[in-house]
Amino acid sequence: MLNTPWDTGSPLYRKLVITALILTGVGILLAIAGAMLQTDPMVFAALPIIIAGMAAHLAGLIVRGRDARRRIRPPQT
């Protein structure tokens, strides 16, 4: 059995990864649609959505690191 981050990740990590993927994807689609339609406001509206997706991704990395440290650290008695 493979120990992938998805298999060993906490529910919070999984939610953050899914949120990051959705936000980034929606932002990219909006940016492409705005560029094809030559609508600058749509392109500029996509930027904060992409940034929010990247922030969720970074939060997921932080949660994953925290979870890994908790697994490695011996229990305190």
Image (spheres, grey):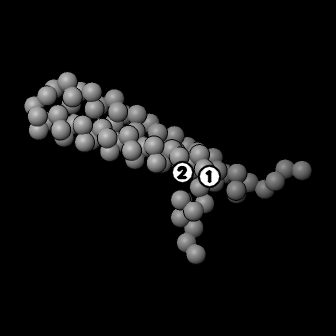
On the image, which quarter does residue 72 sit in?
bottom right
Q: Which mark is residue 28?
A: none
Q: Which secondary structure, mark 2?
A: helix
Task: Give the residue at x 27% y 27%.
Answer: 45
Query: CB of mark 2 within 8 Å of CB of mark 1?
Result: yes
Circle on res. 14: 2
Asked if residue 57 can be seen in this view, the reply is no
Farthest residue, direction right? 77
Amino acid residing under circle 1: Ser
Question: What residue is rendered at 35% in x and 33% in y?
Answer: 49
Q: Residue furthest top?
A: 41
Q: Is residue 74 above or below residue 32?
A: below
CA neighbours of label 1 inside 10 A, class few (<14), some (14 to 19), many (20+): some
Residue annotated with mark 1: 10
Residue 28 seen: yes
Specify the quadrant of the image occupied by residue 34. Answer: top left
Question: Left or right: where does residue 56 sit relative to residue 24?
Answer: right
Q: Is 18 located above or below residue 31 in the figure?
A: below
